[in-house]
Image (cartoon, rainbow, N blue to C red):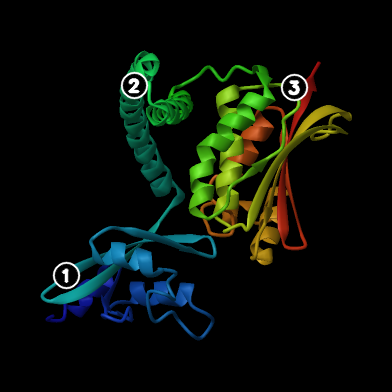
Amino acid sequence: MPPAPADLLAALDEGVGLLAADGGVVASNDAMRAVLGAVGRPGAPAANLRGLGVDADDEARLRAGEAVAVAHAGRHWRLRCRAVAGADVLFAAETTAADRAASALAELARLRLLGRSAGVLVHDFNNMLNAAIGLAATLRPLAADPTDAQLLQDMTAGTQRGAQLLRSVARMLARSPRERVRTPLAAVVAEAVALAEKALLHRGVRPAVAPVPDVHVRSEPTECVQAIWHGLIGLAELAPKSVRVDVDLVDAAIGDGRPRRCARLRLAAAVADEAAAAAISRHLAGDSGLLAALGSPALPSGLAAALFVQRQLGGDLTAVAADGAITLAYLWPALA
């Protein structure tokens, strides 16, 4: 690659550097040297993509032409890689909060459009499953062979479960007035576990669910399901050895309120990474670092959302890590 004029490179606010096949980065202008220095240690600037905070997956995306965002000490950069005259050139542009907000709004608009499209597909697919359930019900009296009868029964049970999951997804995709209503906790827990069970089974864990008492809470049902689902998915990301779900009634104070009768849902998981479990417990307790942990491996995706949703709905979410286990505890005021 022929060198670019030095005065042109010096005039750029965007960092420019050569990217080697092994991930090494050689700065071509002062702006890139400033980026490598800001991300590295004092006296030892970053020298490669790993030093910039780019892992193997992000490196593959970067080399494929996608933009990758990195952050360090409260500063953010957008990295791009382009092939120029047979060489890979790395560009690094610092982004402001306004830039990121504008990008987030565009992404939100895209996700809303995707959500509406997905809602239509879910609705149509649910109609197909209901047709299959109706067909199975029509054929059942005609099945004289016990094997055929059992096959129809299994197909009906599986199809009904699929239809239940689709109805749950459809409710989450739909925009709701967010009205808190009297909600049976048993139904909410069953729906959330059904949604998260596949992710846990992929980890080789089947959740053990204790019988849920007949208790009602005042909540927005869809967001209540979503908060519990986020918790289960967060535990799945910790590669748990076991997951237990149970509900009981306790006297507890939510926030600065007075103690009152509350429904408590506990999601308990045995995990190998005790440091990660302890970090989650500290973040959910409100210790400093929650904002920095958002979107990072320190806080599994969804747990922060579950915390905000719980408190918005008038409940609470805490975590306790001890002896190789972490327990997420959800609280809602119980209704008589």
The amino acid type of the residue labelled 3 equals Asp
Q: Is residue 307 above or below residue 53?
A: above
N-term-proximal mark, 3 vs 1: 1
* Residue pointed to by mark 1: 83
At a point 48% along the width and 61% down the height, the residue shown is 75
Q: Is residue 319 visible?
A: yes
Residue 32 circle label = none
* Residue pointed to by mark 2: 132
Q: Residues within 10 Å of mark 1 (few under 14, many from 20)?
A: some
Q: Residues within 10 Å of mark 3 (few under 14, many from 20)?
A: few
Distance between mark 2 and mark 3 Cα atoms? 32 Å
Expressed as whole percent of the image width and height from the top left, the position of residue 112 reads 37, 31
Expressed as whole percent of the image width and height from the top left, the position of residue 220 reads 61, 22
Q: Residues within 10 Å of mark 2 (few under 14, many from 20)?
A: some
Q: In terms of secondary structure, where does tag 1 sit?
A: strand
Taking the image as shown, residue 140 lies to the left or right of residue 186, namely left
In this view of the protein, which residue sits in the foreground, 31 or 141? Answer: 141
The amino acid type of the residue labelled 1 equals Ala
Q: Is residue 315 above or below residue 320?
A: above
At a point 38% along the width and 79% down the height, the residue shown is 48
Q: In terms of secondary structure, where does tag 3 sit?
A: loop
Mark 2 vs mark 3, foreground winner is: 2
Q: Quadrant of residue 229?
A: top right
